[in-house]
Image (cartoon, rainbow, N blue to C red):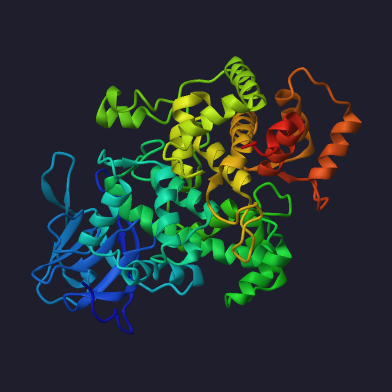
Amino acid sequence: MFSGGAGKGVTGIKVTGRTGRHAQINGTYEPSQQSHNGKPVWISRSVQPVYFFHTGKARWVISKRVDDGSKCYAFTKDKDAADPSATGNPLVCCDDDGEWRADAKVSIMQTPAGNDKFMQLRMTLDGELDKLGIKSEDQMKSLWKRLDYNGNNIVSLAEIDKMVVEMVSGGTWPAWLNNKPALMRAYKKTINEDGGDGDWVHKHQFHGLMLNIFWFNKLFQIFQVMDGNDRRMDIREFTAGMSQLGLNLSGAEATEEFNKMDSNHGGQVLFVEFCAYVRKRVNPDANPNFDADIVSGEHCMAAVRKHHGHKSTHAHMVTRKTMSDFDACEKKMKVTIADNSKLKDLWHHLDFNGNRIVSLAEIDKFAVEKFPVLNHKPALMRAYKATIGEKRADGTHGGSHGDDWVYSKDFKKLLTNLFYFNKIYWIFNKFDGDDRRMTFDEFKKCLTLCASGHRMSEQEIKSDFSKVDRNGGGIILFDEFCRYFTQKACPEGLTDMVD
């Protein structure tokens, strides 16, 4: 599909002035290592793909993929110009009424090519897809059919995770692509873009999803090197990590850059903050809402119903939850884990093929069917990770099996984690938001709300907080609180199921 490269001396291209339909064409396009029809290809700095290339006939076009230009956002006529800024012709865009018109407000100009290390990393993503044989339209269609096996043109987080696990375990994809924090980030960014449709990734978003998976896994690799494997990064680790990337910062420069990430000035940053920081370096003109996470699922289906009607979501709707819903679910869950025969019956429903292991996708389907109040994807993902054990820096797991499956002996733990992680997420979202960290005051408030009917003294709460806050930094990760409280509230649920 591609041959050669952009060549030395090729500058960047900047597009400004487009409003209304297809305003996403505005921005800076960097020269890629690809060429198309013997002319350079430029790629937008945003991770969501937008390309500027020549059709080989008489047009430079802006499109979401490099092809013959028949389906594009905009074009400018050309005979022999070296780049789109030199045609002397206006950019022709498709307006809201479907008509193509020259837009005199739009400017196309040359701009110096960027030299930021993270921006250069972004420019390698298309080549990574190409190397794995998933860049051409036919190859992407084939992979989408594998992912969307029921053919409804939407896929869930669990289905995406299942695909990644299978592609990595089969040796088709490299192992570094299978990291849950990176996958969650890629999934959220994909569903947030193009007006997002709640919990679902649509067929037209698939190319963007694949680029996001590669992008956030690349960033996760860098973050793991920087953070010392405790999932937090301080300024010392940041400065040393940037130096390894060839970005040598003075003390003042390092402090200034670190403070851009450390929004709450706690002295530590998380992977999500690191991703937002890199996004601003790569694409500083982008909408800052790009980094706003989806936390609550209560309104996530509005866009799906708009596009597909109410019937499309009747089985997946996330309704407003109440404490009584969780109280009833907790009672049901505790009765089940105390009765081994009931537990086995429920396991056989989940493990319908009887192979004694279940995947994240099967767990997601099970939660929707059996415990609708627990249908919250971020909580599901973290409960699953807590059950199988966190992945260590060397790629192994802290769990008992060392792989991505939940086994029958861990089913009781899975149910317990599913319930308490969902309950805590629901309560925590009421007053905190999505910074994924807890101060002592937040710990105290959340503990009081979660442990209804059980009062602890101030000294007991301080003692428990210190046990969770192992490094004494005064802040704990939200996931750490989930694990702590689950152990405290239901230790009997964190034992093996008896076969």
**Residue positioned 60% across, 30% down in the render:** 419
Q: Nearer the viewer, residue 58 or 404?
A: 404
Residue 196 in the image: state x and y as whole percent: 37, 40
**Residue positioned 46% across, 31% down in the render:** 349
**Which corner quadrant holds the N terminus?**
bottom left
Q: Residue furthest front?
A: 499
Q: Nearer the viewer, residue 94 or 455?
A: 455
Residue 166: image quadrant is: bottom left
Q: Nearer the viewer, residue 34 or 401?
A: 401
**Residue positioned 38% across, 74% down in the render:** 112
Horizontal side of 61 relative to 322 (left or right) equals left
- Above or below residue 435? Residue 226 is below
Q: Residue furthest right?
A: 459
Is residue 90 in sight in this rendering?
A: no
Horizontal side of 315 relative to 3 (left or right) equals right
- Above or below residue 150? Residue 260 is below
Total numbered labels placed on residues in the image = 0
Residue 141: image quadrant is: bottom left
Residue 424 in the image: state x and y as whole percent: 64, 31
Is residue 332 in sight in this rendering?
A: yes
Residue 317 in the image: state x and y as whole percent: 40, 25
Residue 365 in the image: state x and y as whole percent: 43, 34
- Above or below residue 445? Residue 17 is below
**Residue positioned 59% across, 46% down in the render:** 385
- Above or below residue 215? Residue 337 is above
**Which corner quadrant holds the C terminus?**
top right
